Image: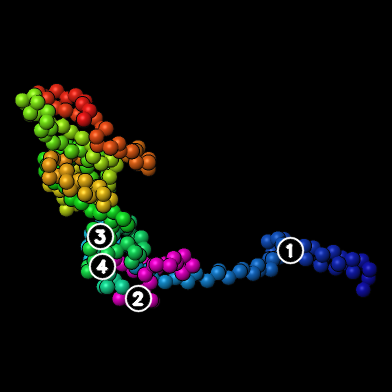
Amino acid sequence: MKPARLAVLAIALAAGGGAALLMSGGDPPSAPVARADAPPPPPVTEVLVAAAELPMGQVLQPADLRWQRWPEDALTPGYVTRKDNPKALEENAGATIRSAFLPGEPIRPQKLVRPDSGFMAAILPSGLRAVAIVTDSRGTNSAGGFILPNDRVDVIRTFRDEDNSRATGSDVQVSQTILNDVRVLAVGQLIQEKNGTNVVTGETATLALTPAQAEKITLAQKVGSLSLALRSLADSGRPPESEPPPQDKALTVMRFGVARQQTR
């Protein structure tokens, strides 16, 4: 074959290869990239939780509880799991709530009171006594009815001063603060604010007192009437006010509708 024909044939092959490359769409496809497999989901278990908001003092019903999937690495000692106690939902029905639960909060036995235990004794701090005092159901001697459970109050005793009454020939009433900064456990039968209740009235108020305070307030009820003075939230956490001996304490004397301070 002549050299001229070989040159023409080489040019034709080169042109055909270029045309085929242009028609193929560009660079050849790259090799597929290997993808890492997704990590397996963390192990979970079922935990007994509150199905709704549960206030303190409520008696649990089966509908108040439910099982919820919970990551095992987030379990805390005290949680009730289905694998350890499959009948926990039925067994906890009838218990009284010692401390409120939020929706979805795990149920812990430490926050429940069994039916065979006294609820008030369970919520009372160690060393204190629960003492009920009689109050006016109209709220006239309990801050207008705005005192709620867990509020802090002062207890004021009002009584007739016999000596001054005889000396002046008139009825002299005396008021005196006998206890400072005590906690209200219950008002009537209500032990916690519920459903947006802002005003609670009742004929009794149950206070958390030391044994000595319980003796003092029991005697005060026998010889006079008691009133509750609501303390500000800003006073919480402050050290208790010192109480001077009764003989050195000034008294508020009401005479003909006018109040004045008088020492013993």
The figure's colour scheme reads rainbow
Q: Is residue 90 left or right of residue 166?
A: right
The residue that disc 1 covers is 21
Nearer mark to the viewer, of 4 and 2: 4
Q: Secondary structure at mark 2?
A: loop
Residue 80 part of the magenta-drawn span: yes
Residue identifier under label 4: 114
Q: Position of residue 118 (x, y in %)?
A: 22, 63
Q: Residue at x 85, y 68 (%)?
A: 9
The alpha-carbon separation of the residues under discs 1 and 2 comes to 72 Å
Q: Mark 2 sits on what residue?
A: 85
Q: Position of residue 66 (x, y in %)?
A: 31, 67
Q: Nearer the viewer, residue 139 or 154?
A: 154
N-term-proximal mark, 4 vs 2: 2
Element marked by disc 3: helix
Q: Is residue 146 above or below residue 13?
A: above
Question: Can residue 198 be spotted in the picture?
Answer: no
At mark 1, the secondary structure is helix
Q: Position of residue 182 (x, y in %)?
A: 28, 45
Where disc 4 sits, the SS reads loop
Marks 1 and 2 close (CB-CB < 8 Å): no
Q: CA distance from mark 2 to mark 3?
A: 27 Å
Region in magenta: 62-87
User: Closer to the N terminus: mark 1 or mark 3?
Assistant: 1
The residue under label 3 is 121
Amino acid at pointer 3 = Ala
Q: Mark 4 belongs to which amino acid?
A: Arg
